[in-house]
Image (cartoon, rainbow, N blue to C red):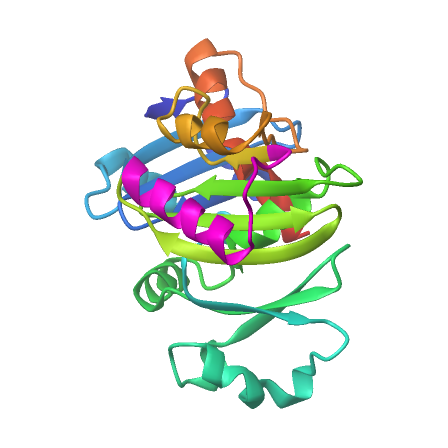
Amino acid sequence: MKYTAENFHLHYIPHYQLLIKSDFTTDTLIVLDESLEVQALYAYPSQTPDTDATKLLGLPFQDIAISLPLQSFTLVPSEVYDSRRMEHYQAFVQDEQLNRTQAEPINGLDITGVFQFDLFLHKRWSAIFPQAKFLADFQVVLATAQRYLPETGQVLGIHAKDKQVDLFVFQGKELQFYNIFDVEQVADLQYFVLNVCNNLGMTDQFSQVLLSGVPAEHPFMAVAQRHGKTVQLMQAHVKLHSSEPEVQAHIRSLNLMADFRLCVS
């Protein structure tokens, strides 16, 4: 996908926001103006960015939000989390370097996520945009999911990325489970969902399945329908827009990427 709006102007760069979703196989760049109109949209293989994307990354953006995959992740109840004792959480992360371990509270759930970004991708993007604000998908996913939760019943969440899937389970408004799995195909997702069901003692369908990160016609929808009485495609709270139908359709398929701006504001 390559798109640049006719009214994209270099002298407006200080007023534009650049959103980047970087993953193991695909990078997506979105440039927004102050009215949330898409001024540019590029999606390309991570290892081989085209010339236009490289030029875009070389522009002097000031407001930049970048989402990266994680190499380590755990959740800690906020009531016992202590930011002064970060070394206590190193046993739950892959890299021993304490300066790579970060923590972010999840509003509304009284939980703090302790995590490390993928080392290679974090180094790459930090070198390009040292002033950027970095975020992890779980921040956006859990913030959005809370808008869809019923008062009772078990809800399964499936958030898909390039080669990973975040699975989470709520009982009513309470988060019971959240983990990240390596998924290459539908059979992998089905396997991990069944494991989660077995571990939680689930013998019936979930009252609802929340799906994000993929469009409705994606093969993962079949897994969601198999395990949920109803399936809801999560959508971003922030509404981006474009006058181009193809761009507008692509924006919808990106689901939660528009809400990056809420998590770094």
> Image point 35% across, 46% down: which residue?
191
Which one is in front, 123 or 135?
135
Residue in view at x 73 percent, y 80 percent = 80
- In percent of width and height, residue 76 lies at 64, 72
Q: Position of residue 111 (x, y in %)?
A: 69, 65
Looking at the rendering, the stretch of residues picked out in magenta corresponds to 186-208
> Is 215 within the magenta?
no
Of the pair 204 and 228, the residue shown nearer to us: 204
Q: Residue furthest right?
A: 151
State the image quarter where residue 258 is shown.
Answer: top right
How far across and down, in percent of the image, does residue 228 sit? 55, 31
Q: Is residue 64 visible?
A: no
Residue 128 position, x and y percent, is 37, 58
Q: Is residue 115 above or below residue 169?
A: below
Residue at horizontal 30 percent and vertical 44 percent from the top: 188
Magenta span dominant secondary structure: helix
Q: Quadrant of residue 42?
A: top left
Q: Residue at x 50, y 49 (%)?
A: 197
Of all residues, the one furthest to the left in this rendering is 48
**Residue 194 appearing in the image:** yes
